[in-house]
Image (tube, rainbow, N blue to C red):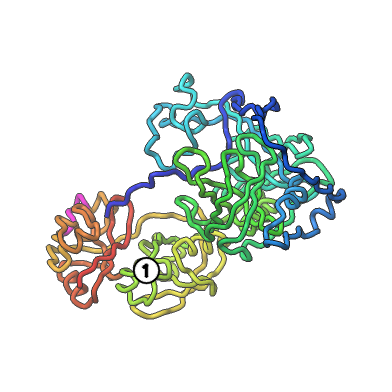
Amino acid sequence: MNIKPLNAALLTAGLLAGGAAGALNLPQWLKGEPKPVPAASPAPQLVAAAEPAPVSPAAQAQAPVPLLRDAGVPNYRAIVKQAGPAVVGITVEGMHKVSREEQGGADAEGDPFAQFFRGMPGFPGFQQRGRGQPQQPFRGQGSGFIISSDGLILTNAHVVNEAKEVTVKLSDRREFAAKVLGTDKTTDIAVLRIDAKNLPTVRLGDPRQIEVGDPVLAIGAPYGLEQTATQGIVSAKGRSLPGDAVVPFIQTDAAVNPGNSGGPLFDGGGAVVGINSQIYSQSGGYQGLSFAIPINVALKIKDQIVATGRAQHGRLGVNVQDLTQALADSFGLPRPDGALVANVAPKSAAAAAGLKAGDVITEVNGEPVVRSGNLSSLIGLSAPGERVKLKVWRDHEAREIEARLGGADAGEKQAAATDGGPQDGKLGLALRPLTPNEKRSVNGAQGLVVEDAAGPAARAGINPGDLLLAINGKPVQSAEQVSEVVAKSGKSVALLIQRGGDKIFVPVKIG
């Protein structure tokens, strides 16, 4: 099955610049220069709104923000006035370690996960004059927000990555040197502290209460333009992104650009529900898809970092994928809900608990698992050593399995399968056993090599050279076993295929 990369990039939304910070070409009206005014008809009469009475920082942190009654629209002006003082700009300086790929200046135009765009640290071709140097100086910008009056600040880990000096600038233009208490690359959360007292703080909300379509507001420093507010709606919840499966992202259409990273996402009542982290873009700028880390995830990581200086994540030791209706039919499930186990790592928590490839995990501690990303989030945000109760669908029936989670550093070697035989015509596959050399090249795995694929298998994306490990979760040791399992199946079967170092279930319609 050919899996093509995305044509756009998920980009971290921090703003970086090599060497001295580059100048930003602003239009004339932003520079304060007179804007040409055409000969016009008489201007309409405007009535100035009365200025609200000053509110103390303590009252700001506690008082709810009213909604406009006439249309139910959030009072964005009140939200910015109340929470804006707690949003900070972050500048960093450090030395970027140049990888071999960067030194070679390889073209990354086709890389859908390029960290940024050309001219930025970490991107091939950055500071071409310095090729061959192991490190490059850089400066960067991002955003953050104050969560405690004694100077505790949340931002993204990628904002302060490799930074030697971190400076926090408040909305009143005061600047403080910040200490990085800790970072967690898994969730992209960093915790900073500045030496200050009686600071304004944001009000924290509950992202579980927001729904798709609810209004949201983002405040940050895109391209270094401090205290910039943009608004939109919640576009989706629980998004699982490539490389960030632990975080159930909040997707919005609020404009987020480089420099917004680490800034707060507010709900319609002025409470922080997320931390703006990534954008989906073909150009490096905003294109309508922004992603925020739920604040409850960030606070869980913050508590660990403040207590121990680092965060830890539980690990089950499985590779999982989403179910399709065809796969659900193959396993006898009425709906394509759950996380399908494609691989179990040896000596992992999953192996010790007895999980097998072909199991479908439908619940964790009573929480439903609808997609594979739900499982990754529930497990990744648990602690190593924690016991979890899994509801698993196996052999057309549900069962419960308890697993004691390992740590994030647990081994992840691929699990093996079995042996082989010549051919199965109903699938359209020509199969043969692995040779001794081939077994060594796949770490001893024993399966059936696909010599040729036609008919249903070819339409499903099976290619010559793929390794067939199992059908409907049952390891195959010969072509006779393949034919036997297929004969007892319904209109579709699920083939566990290994291609290179990856394993994936592929649904094949045979009826």
Would residue 246 appear left or right of 103 to someone viewing this image?
A: right
Q: In the image, 309: left or right of 103?
A: right
Which quadrant: the N terminus? bottom left
In the picture of the structure, the residue carrying the numbered disc 1 is: 356
Query: Magenta stretch: residue 435 in it?
Result: yes
- The three-letter code of the residue at mark 1 reads Lys
Residue visible at 52% across and 64% down? 405
**Front-most of residues 498 and 208:** 208
The residue positioned 57% from the left and 29% from the top of the image is 17
**Nearer to the camera, 419 or 266:** 266
Q: Is residue 6 above or below residue 432?
A: above
Q: Residue furthest top?
A: 129
Identify which residue is drawn at 75% across, 39% down.
Answer: 170
Mark 1 is surrounded, within 10 Å at the Cα level, by few (under 14), some (14 to 19) or many (20 or more) other residues, namely many
Residue 125: x and y in percent read: 44, 27
Residue 372 belongs to magenta span: no
Boundaries of the magenta span: 433-438
Q: Which residue is found at the position 39% from the left and 35% from the top?
A: 109
Circle 1 sits in a helix, a strand or a loop, which is it? loop
Q: Nearer the viewer, residue 224 or 216?
A: 216
